[in-house]
Structures are given as C-alpha cells and as structure tokens.
Image: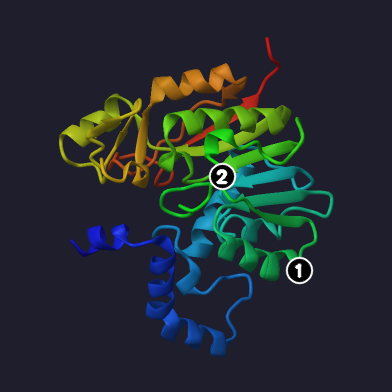
Amino acid sequence: MKRQLLRLLPFSTKLALRRIYYFPNDLVDRLKGRDSLTPPQGMIYIGTGDFKEIGDNFKHYFIELANLQPNERVLDLGCGIGRMAVPLTNYLTQEGEYWGFDIVNKWIAWCKKHISSRFGNFHFQYVDLYNKIYNPKAKVKAIDFRFPFSDDYFDFVFLTSVFTHMLPSDLEHYLSEVSRVLKQGGRCLITFFLLNDESRHLIRTGRSNFDFKHKIEGCLTVDANEPEFALAYNENIVRGLFARYQLQIIEPIHFGSWCERATFLDFQDIIVAEKTASN
C-alpha cells in the first residue's frame, strides 16, 4: 500500500523525500570524502541495486557483447545521473566521445558538474520531453522527438531500462532514430521485458516478479492506471521491429532474471544488434 501511494506522488516530490531520507547517509559520505563521481544516494532514483556495481556490469556487457572500442562515439539514451557514463570515463580515450541525454534536468546538471568538468569528451544534454512520471509539464512527445544528432554519427547506442517504460508508438519511433544515428556496422544494446514461452509460463505460474496481466496498445503492463511503470513486449514483435530498421540481432538474446528464470545474465533482457545496409 505504501509503495502504491508513493507512486501517486509527483516525481519532484519523490525526489525531495528521497533527499530528506538519505540526508544523514549522504552527510556522512561527504564528510568521509565520497568519490566525486558517485552521486549522493538522495539523488539516485533509478531502481534498486548498487550504483557502481550496475554501471561496471554494463560496461562489461558493452565491451564483451557489443564490442565497444575505446575510440568510438557513444550515445546513452536516458542517461539518468550517469550510472553508465561513470565507468566509461576510464575506458573511452580522448579519441572516443560520449553523449547522454535525459528528461530530468537535475540529473543532467549533476553530470555536467561532476563528469563533464573532468572529462571533456563526455557531454550531457537535457531534453524537455513529456513523460507522465518524470516530466509531465513538457509539451513535446517522444514520438515527435528527433535525436539532436546527424545521420550515421555513432558507433554505439544503448538504452537501459528505457523501452521497459515506453509505449509501442514511442518505442518504434525511438528505434528508427537509433538506426538513423548509427553508422553502418554500428551496434546498439537495449534492455527489455520480453514475452516468450518461458517468461509467459513463469508469469502464469506466479513465479515472475511482474505479472504483466493488463493489455494496452499492443503490449502488456503490470498497472493499468500507470502503464509506463513497466511494459513487456512479445519477443517476435520486437524481432520484427529490429529487422524493419536494419538492426540485425546478434544472437543469442541475453534473457534476464525478472521472471525468475533459472539461467540469466542480468535483471532485464538484453538485445545487442548491428546496423546493416538498407535493402
């Protein structure tokens, strides 16, 4: 019940409450000389798990699964407060380039102050896009947003826990934009909640962490009143979308533990794909 009530509060209010709750811990960390590349706990609002550990894990996935090279151009869509950017600061060389954007201005301001000030090839940009939870006053919708980069600019694009909160029309538009800004031969890594025989079985038997029982606009959600809290997509439909936008999936898909499957790589399902030549 408490969790349900918290979800009804405006995002700015939830952030303020989190800052208050973690103030004693953050004060102690500051007095001890906390690493300047680790944000205070009161500002981290991106799910459970250790900030540094998750970032380091994904850095490993970027390198091992998507062949990220130190001199490449990287785009982080929904960069948050730099969880994925921080571990890349000791991997990308000066020939490499990182760009991240997000719809929460406070997170972007923190990243500019603490990351860009030390690493000149790391760039962060606030985009004023509408989101029912995070940015409800904005006028521009995701489906109308053109990424502020030229065609074929990036070697690697990644989205972590973005499409798990995005409705189908917005998701398809973003996927088309990912393909547009990727060079031919460039790669992307994107996380999902994917529905297939295994995950559906685990949901039906009540083992999954998410029930995904409400149908909405071609996908399933756990909350009909707040659908973007968590959205799941049919694996075959996702495969078709990737093919439509010249993104060839590098098999296998790396399935996650979200539905309590026995074998998994991370929490969400991970798809890695390469941009191929258009027909």
Occupied quadrant, residue 66: top right
Residue at image location 79% in from the left, 46% down from the top: 71
Occupied quadrant, residue 210: top left
Name which residue type carries label 1: Arg
Q: How many marks?
A: 2
Which residue is label 2 attached to? 61
**The N terminus appears in which quarter of the rendering?**
bottom left
Q: Tell me the number on the disc at residue 118.
A: 1
Residue at image location 28% in from the left, 29% down from the top: 198
The x and y percentages for residue 52 are 53, 64
Please say if 217 is above or below 132: above
Report whether 91 appears left or right of 200.
Answer: right
Residue at image location 23% in from the left, 40% down from the top: 211
Helix, strand or loop at mark 2: helix
Helix, strand or loop at mark 1: loop
Residue furthest to the right: 95
